Amino acid sequence: MKKLLLFMSALLLMTACSKDEDNDDDSVPSTEPSWAGVPSKPHEMFERTVLVYISGENNLSKQIATELSELRQGSKGIGNNALVVYVDDANSRRNPYLLWIREGESVDSVTLDSDPYSSSPEAMSRILNFTSTYYPAQEYGLVLWGHASGWMIGDSIATSSSARIGSWDDDTVNSRRAFGVDNGENTTSVVGKWINMPTLANTLAHWKHLKFIFADCCQFQCIESAYELLGVCDYLIASPAEIPDRGAPYDTVTKGFFEKSEKFYETIVDSYFAQVVPWSLPWYEYNSRTPLSVIYMPEMLNLATATHEVLTHFVGEEYPDMSSLIYYMGNQNSSKESVMYDMNDFILKHTMRKSPATTADTAAYEKWKEVFDRTVIYKKNAKNGWASSGQVVPSMFQYLKDDARYGGVSMFVPQNRPNSWYEPYTSNGVAFDGYNKSIKQTAWYYAAHLNDFGW
């Protein structure tokens, strides 16, 4: 599937990209490429190829010019590696395009023959395969840039309990599907089509095994999303919280994409975390950072087993209250809707922080935490809080002060709250199953045997 012969049809559908004289930003290189269109042949083998997949046909489109400028800066001095960038923005005067950025310049530039939904698995596969054919490497990395909603994907989540089964339903326009909303109209609307996690995992599983996935999008680092990507990548680098519109500072973060060090991910996280974004709400002003963590994917099975075991020590207790560290409130107007709890804080609260905590509780938490630390191998705690659109009120940031509580990965916990979004509800005329039922369609639910607890 990855041989050159299979790309002949793709080549016929690609056209040369010339400078867009009507361009109103700097998304397309200001200099002419060294040759026009599709490369005449694949490049020589690189050590690592990293594809930055920019799904920006939405309200993030205006950020893309800055991101490309930072990527050009970050590409300097990366050695025998390839930085490839796919761009789909809200500019109606051009189709999505692909760049090879090298030493600060956009060298190769290829434009698609059409403007597909970048959230469709077919479009994504086309870009993935084109990248590995013309920029082959010993190993690969992927950056997912755009909007995301964690595992909460409305009424169209694909069942993934027994296998990675995914669909991209053209009829369900308003459903939230975890990553990469594309409105299909070259506007700044965020009403469009998403790709759900099982479909994303299935698409990537049919490509190359990835050294890492860096998700530069909101709330990607939840255990439910991460588990769907089991076997797809070695490391998942992301935030459990919202991120600022500007995203990562790629002029510094890009260096980490190509580091040979075993702990290359620390450069990515540290560079991102160093970025301070002034943020203000009518009643609150603060200098925000982005909380981040790194999951070592081969340990995920062990974490699922350990989580099931530790839950047996407090199952049946009252569900957590709003004093817990959370990353998302499904209904911004109701404290009942906290749906993304910090995983470590949740387990800690119901074992070690119980009053009084028994010896058995302490041992159970410490045993689970040992596996958790082998899985979540690196993290940064944004103690002053992150840039929030209101999904989390700033009063929640007080719980970040204690490093012992912060785990950097979220986890959904079902709750018995009638007349809430946990139970079946209707929003804007669309019927939803509710979070308590939707969680049962994730692979994590079955891996951790959450059904054993009546969840």
Image (cartoon, rainbow, N blue to C red):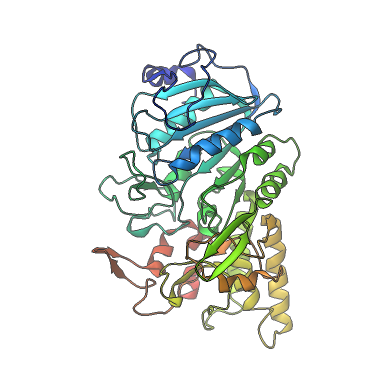
Q: Of all residues shown, which one is farthest toward the right?
A: 261
Q: Quadrant of the C terminus?
A: bottom left
Q: Could you tell me which residue is drawn at 33 percent across and 66 percent down?
A: 433
In the image, 423 versus 208, the foreground residue is 423
Residue at (55, 34) in percent of width and height = 68
Quick check: can you spot residue 164? no
- Name above or below for residue 287 compared with residue 215: below
Residue at figure coordinates x 65%, y 69% from the top left = 400
In-image side of 226 versus 348 (left or right): left
Q: Is residue 402 left or right of residue 101?
A: right
Please tell me whether residue 129 is drawn above or below residue 225 in the rendered image.
Answer: above
Between 419 and 224, the residue placed more toward the observer is: 419
Give the total of numbered labels.
0
Specify whether residue 321 is in view: yes
| Of the pair 383 and 218, the residue shown nearer to us | 383
Vertical side of 421 occupied by 160: above or below = above
Determine whether, in the image, residue 159 is placed left or right of residue 387.
left
Q: Position of residue 128 (x, y in %)?
A: 48, 31
